[in-house]
Amino acid sequence: MFTAGCCGRIFCSPAAGHLPGAQASACKPSGTEVNVTVTTAIRRQRALALLEAIAAGDIDHIRALLAPDCCWDIPGFGVYDRETFLASLANTITLTDHRRFHNVIVTAEDNRVAVAVDGEFRFRDGRDYNNRYHYLFEFSGDRIIRGVEYMDTALASNLFRGQQ
């Protein structure tokens, strides 16, 4: 797994002994970004890191993975800018005490990563929300510039429209 290093945009491997926030060999002493080739493998890892951050409820990590001008498209619900999407996601995280993704299938090509996954969420009031998702992530460099989140929108609408 790769995590953001000292500059927040360089990837350090814990296996290599680098820790998030630590000065990594790929960073300049000032902590500014250096030129790093962003590969399909890195983009794949970043897409999976986003789902891990959602499951962990880590909005700050999610924010770091999204480009400032990111848009998030949920067919049947709308297209959101980064901050609106993050606010909605933060609300969902607040309302749930269990979030998990499993049965992950990933395909990556060029600047796109597609992830099919089953999601399990349990609301604090005891309700379960289990849906199947297909995410299409488009990247600009190492950050997600566009996310498209396909799911059973009727199931989501029945649950979430009553929450807002």
Image: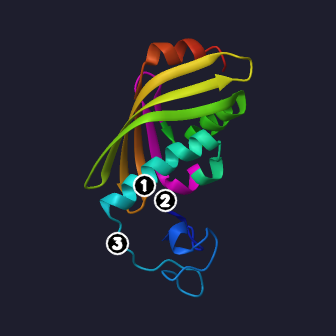
How many neighbours does mark 2 have within 10 angstroms: few (below 14), some (14-19), or many (20 or more)?
few
- Badge 3 local density, few (<14 within 10 Å), some, or many (20+)? few
Which is nearer the N-term, disc 3 or disc 1? 3
Mark 1 and mark 2 in contact (Cβ < 8 Å)?
Answer: yes
Residue 132 quadrant:
top left
| Residue 94, magenta (yes or no) | no
Image point (66%, 15%), residue name: 127
Residue 74 magenta: yes
**64 and 78: which is toward the camera:** 64
Residue bearing mark 2:
1
* Percent x, y of residue 111: 30, 54
What amino acid is labelled 1 in the image? Gln
Q: Is residue 32 left or right of residue 107?
A: right
Q: Are marks 2 and 3 in contact (CB under 8 Å)?
A: no
Residue drawn at 35 percent across, 66 percent down: 38
User: Which residue, given by chain and number where applicable, does mark 3 sit on?
Assistant: 37
Secondary structure under the numbered disc 3 in the rendered image = loop
Q: Position of residue 55 (x, y in %)?
A: 59, 39
Magenta-colored span: 62-79
Q: Quadrant of residue 89?
A: top right
Task: Name the secondary structure under disc 2.
Answer: loop
Nearest to N terminus: mark 2 or mark 3: 2
Three-letter amino acid code at disc 2? Met
Using the numbered discs, state the Cα–Cα distance from disc 3 to disc 1 in whole angstroms. 14 Å
Identified at 61% across, 18% down, the residue is 128
Mark 3, mark 1: which one is toward the viewer?
1
In this rendering, the label closer to the viewer, 2 or 1:
2
Residue 64 drawn at (x, y percent): 56, 57
